[in-house]
Image: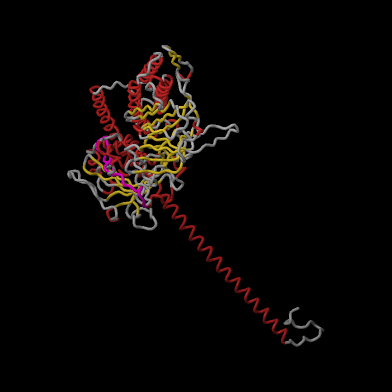
Amino acid sequence: FDLRMPPKDGGPPPKKLTAKDKKRLKEIQKREELEEQCKEIAEQAFKQHEKERVFQEKVDRDKRRQEQDKAEKEDERLAEEAKRYEKVWADFCLRMQLSLKEHEKHKAWDTIVHTSPLPKVNDEADINSFLSIWREGEHEEQGNEEQKRNIDCDFIIVEQAVQLIQTILAELDTVRLLESHPNKSKRPPKGVQFHKNNLINLYTQIQTTLDKLTANVMQYLDKYLDEGDDQPLTLCKTSANIKYGLWAGNKQARVRSVDYSPLSIVVAPKDGAHLPKQLNLMNNVAMRALQFSFDPQSVHEKDDVGLEYYALGGVLIVETMAVPVPAKHVKDWVLRTETSLAMDVQRIAYPPATTDGSSAAPPIRISFQVPDYVVIRHTAPVIGIWSAKHQCWLPDGTNDFSYDAQSRRATFLAQNLTKMAIIQEKGFDVPYEQWCMQPLDSDSVLFVIEGRRRGDMSDRVVKILIKQDLCKVLSPEEPELEYLRSEWYKPATLLRHLSNSGYNFVLKDTDADYTPDILPKSQTMENKGYDDLALFCTTFQFASTRHNKFGEDKNMCLFRVSKQMRPEADHQGLNVDLDDDNKWWTVRYEKERCVLTKCRESDEVANVEELQGCETHLNLYMVMAKEFTIEKVDSSIGNADLLLQDAVKTLLSLVRPFTWG
């Protein structure tokens, strides 16, 4: 009903509008006006939105077109650079191959001049002959009835085997590197498994010889003891790589401790005056202690499984074993019982298993001397045991560690008598705090690496000098590392020795399972990057950047390169201040390209956009050719020491600063 409508014909006159009706009418008018205004606003907003949408679509379309054009130009540029660089790299590889062949020729001549009685590590027949002759000698010596073994001869052959093991380990270092980083100029004659099998055979034969020696001593115990002597036999023998101790022939009711004084090894009770009765040392049970300078267990570790701990300084083995029935002397006759114990040992587990299958016995306190080449980076060394089930070293079954730095004596409590070793986290030094590679002159490079900084006694900076194909440690100046400061080693061998001394810089991708904050970089990207750094190792200075973790992209890394090039005619080195951002470029390095970026070390957040005026290039060679000149760059790498470049590439490929730094 519309109050404004006139009355129909013949109808009653319209009613007079009341105040309420007038108010209602105004509200209706106002609502209609508002609706009209809203409609107009909506139409304007829609038109504006459509205008903005069309504009944004144009902007996006133009941006995509620009990006597409940029990508097409980049692809063309990278393809052209790849074509140009292919010739440069082919020439470099040819020169490297010739240089390595010439070097190997000189090495072969040195090998002829300094002949060795040991078999060749890549000759399967030669190694098998060595093992066969060794085993035949074992049978001949074992067949000499009523005679003591020639312990000195046993240790001579064992030491020869250890020397061969060291040579195989050095070869295995190279083979592993070449298999993980294929190189056309260097191909290993034998694979990893070949060398691992030979190591296992040698370790097994060493243990067999020591077991047969032990069985012989216990079988003819009366010949080793002085007549009328009531004291048990304590036989100790040391060589360059092995400490051997045997305690047997106890005639006392209880044993206070077993002290292998010449070996600096003592087995004592945790509490009280006597060793636990569960050892049964009064019932024809002997105790043997072995300390190796090498680790015969790690060869069984799986290459595709990450490790949390590793052994350093060799292995300590303390075990008990059965003693044969003692010989009886009847007038001029000697009655000696022949059993399997005359040829081999029978180990007795400690703690012994109970009837219900459980094992409970007091722990035993063991002390030994830490090898003089092992750096203790904790307040006391942590002792672990070898897990046959998991095929790795674990921090189980031991506690109460103490260490006397002056005497280098470590003491601990052992729940089990088994294979034990000083262990350390494999990733103790990662992520690296920083690293730097500095050219000292035209034929030597200094590689500096600082492990994870904790602010305690474990913090160290390791400096490695590289010259031609060899390297040595310059610092730390700890006495334990004197052997690495005084001698030159191949890069892989030096890093293995450093690891054995407590500084491990060689890890696998699977080891990152125990360093969850680190994402391993792709092998393709790393190989390409280390090739580039090695190429310019005597031309520019390289350094880490704390922004390397930006984005956690496995196909990208960040590092710094000096803006200054070392003059070729200048025999001085290059020493750029690491804290001066104005003297460094930050490189964004990817699998398919690299570029100089706006990122500075002092920035809170990394800016990895291209530096103004810079374009992406195939690799560092092309970047530097653009920044300097192609003639300067070619001259610098053409006059470089090829053996040095190869050694630098090897060191970088093992340390992997892009991943762990």
The quadrant in which the N terminus is found is bottom right
Tell which of 525 and 350 is nearer to you: 350
**Rendered location of residue 300, percent (x, y):** 45, 30
Q: How is the image coloured?
A: secondary structure
**Rendered location of residue 632, percent (x, y):** 23, 44
Quick check: 480 above or below 139? below
Look at the image and tell me whether residue 590 can be seen. no
**Rendered location of residue 519, percent (x, y):** 44, 45
Look at the image and tell me whether residue 314 can be seen. yes
User: Does the magenta portion include 458?
Assistant: yes
User: Does the magenta portion include 457?
Assistant: yes
Tell which of 109 and 375 is nearer to you: 375
Question: Residue shown at 46%/58% (left/top)?
Answer: 59
Q: As drawn, which residue projects farthest toward the top?
A: 332
Count every numbered label the image shows and give the total. Answer: 0
Q: Which residues are magenta?
A: 455-476
Tell which of 501 and 119 is nearer to you: 501
- For this view, does 37 lie left or right of residue 620? right
Q: Which corner quadrant of the image does residue 269 belong to?
A: top left
- For this view, does 609 lie left or right of residue 40? left
**Rendered location of residue 581, percent (x, y):** 30, 55
Q: Which corner quadrant of the image does residue 79 belong to?
A: top left
Tell which of 232 and 240 is nearer to you: 232
Q: Which corner quadrant of the image does residue 83 belong to?
A: top left
Question: Residue shown at 39%/57% (left/top)?
Answer: 605
- For this view, does 150 lie left or right of residue 115? right
